[in-house]
Image (cartoon, helix red, strand yellow):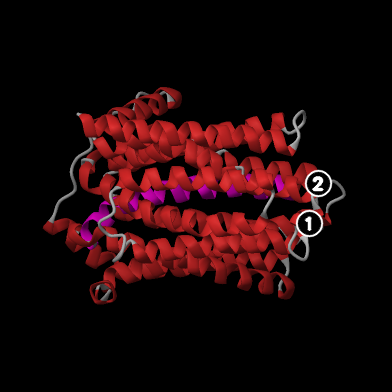
Amino acid sequence: MKKIFANKTYLAVIASDLLSNFGDTLYYMALMNYVLFLPNPNFALSIITLSETLPTFSRLITGFWSDKTKDKLKAIQLTLVFRITIYTILGFIMTFEPALWIVIVAAIFNFFSDVAGQYENGLYIPISLRIIPNEARAEYMGFSQSLGLTTNLLFQSAGALFITMMSFSQLAFVNAATFAVSLLMYTIIKPRIAQLFVQKPLETSENKRSGNIFKDMWQSLKLTLSEMAAIPDLKACMIIVPVLNGLGAVLITLLTLIMSHNKEFIIFNAATTLAIFQTTNIIGMILGGILSMNLLKNLSISHTLQVASALFSALIFAYYLQNIWLILIFLIPIGIISGAINPKLNTLIYTRISENKIATVSAGIYTWFTTGIVITRLLMSGLMLFLSVKWLTLLLFLLSLGLLGYTINDFIRKKVI
């Protein structure tokens, strides 16, 4: 831990990132409150949800562009200037009376801001490879994750306070200001980072743009799958992680459905139950990030996936029993496992993938892992129109058992080999 706090460049980069995250959190909360002033909030909410979902599929192309960008340090500054500009413009637009056209403009700006953020994250990867020593990468990533989750809880509380004190226009300007301060902090440390690239020059990307965005995305996905298949631990994740993510993505929806049918399932009220559920999960992930730096440091990815599969089966069974306390009990170790495995996966990717394609592959892996989320949410949205909560939880429990069986079989097969 002392080494982390002694790394001033790393602390400056993470502080800049956390500051821009606060701006994003504040803006999202403000936008969700803004739609309540419209005569048809449902349509406005669907527009915002779409603007939040679409960037999931753009990671393949932004990662590709990040690898292809030669002057990454200057490009990071330009992405920050771009985001400052659009939120400043939005601040002036929001001085008008609340209207649907403003939500549409805000959603479009939000989409481009998220895409710029993804591009910027890819640009930062080579910087991370230079400011964090390889032997301590898992420890640094565990610390970053725990710090990010902890500050996210604080940001949400602070955001709720800001929304009651400021106009929507002022909140947009505050978001622009957070990016401006991030730009200032980055500009100050830029010479220090540039010196690191002099000591260890950037590898040249061999990726070539075809001119067709869909072809580039397909090439990025193929490259990702081939790289994952070549690394045993990542190959093991190819089936297991998307299914685990898919199961995790519908937990809150399932929780809400059960509350609507079973009042005894609720703790005080629905809002409190949801807040306790989300806070319990986040606390578990914070603990997992911390434990990944010491107690769980040597836990292998394959063993972690086995434990996660078993815990998810137990959790879904608790849903089937409609026992909220049992759900919360299993949610804590699931959060710990999730918080512990993420730094391990990121460390594996950063140490095993060539630098000239790391942003492309990282974005591709993220996209592949989130396919389960998209599929299960689509299935849930359709099935809950026809099936009862009991049948839905039973189907999910059978899916979790199938995943557990696959995980155990994969482990036994590797032991035999």
Give the amino acid type for the residue marked by disc 2 in the picture.
His
Q: Is residue 19 above or below residue 417?
A: below
Mark 2, other Cα within 10 Å: few <14 / some 14–19 / many ≥20 = few
The residue nearer to you, when weighing 373 against 394, is 394
**Which SS does the magenta portion mostly show?**
helix
Tell me if residue 207 can be seen: no
Q: Is residue 405 left or right of residue 96?
A: left
Q: Quadrant of residue 368?
A: top left
Q: Which mark is residue 175?
A: none
Tell me if residue 295 can be seen: yes
The residue nearer to you, when weighing 209 against 239, is 239
Quadrant placement of the C terminus: top left
Give the amino acid type for the residue marked by disc 1 in the picture.
Glu
Quadrant placement of the N terminus: bottom left
Q: Residue at position x 51%, y 55% from top?
A: 83
Mark 1, other Cα within 10 Å: few <14 / some 14–19 / many ≥20 = few
Residue 334: % across, % down: 48, 53
Check if residue 123 falls in the magenta segment: yes
Q: Is residue 295 left or right of residue 114?
A: left
Q: Which residue is mark 2?
A: 261
Q: CA distance from mark 2 to mark 1?
A: 9 Å
Check disc 2 and report its element: helix, strand or loop: helix
Nearer the observer: mark 2 or 1; the answer is 1
Check disc 1 and report its element: helix, strand or loop: helix
Q: Which residue is mark 1?
A: 264
Q: Quadrant of residue 36?
A: bottom right
Q: Quadrant of residue 163?
A: bottom right
Extent of the magenta region? 102-131
Check if residue 241 falls in the magenta segment: no
Q: Residue at position x 66%, y 62% from top?
A: 275
Residue 93: % across, % down: 70, 56
Residue 50: % across, % down: 64, 40
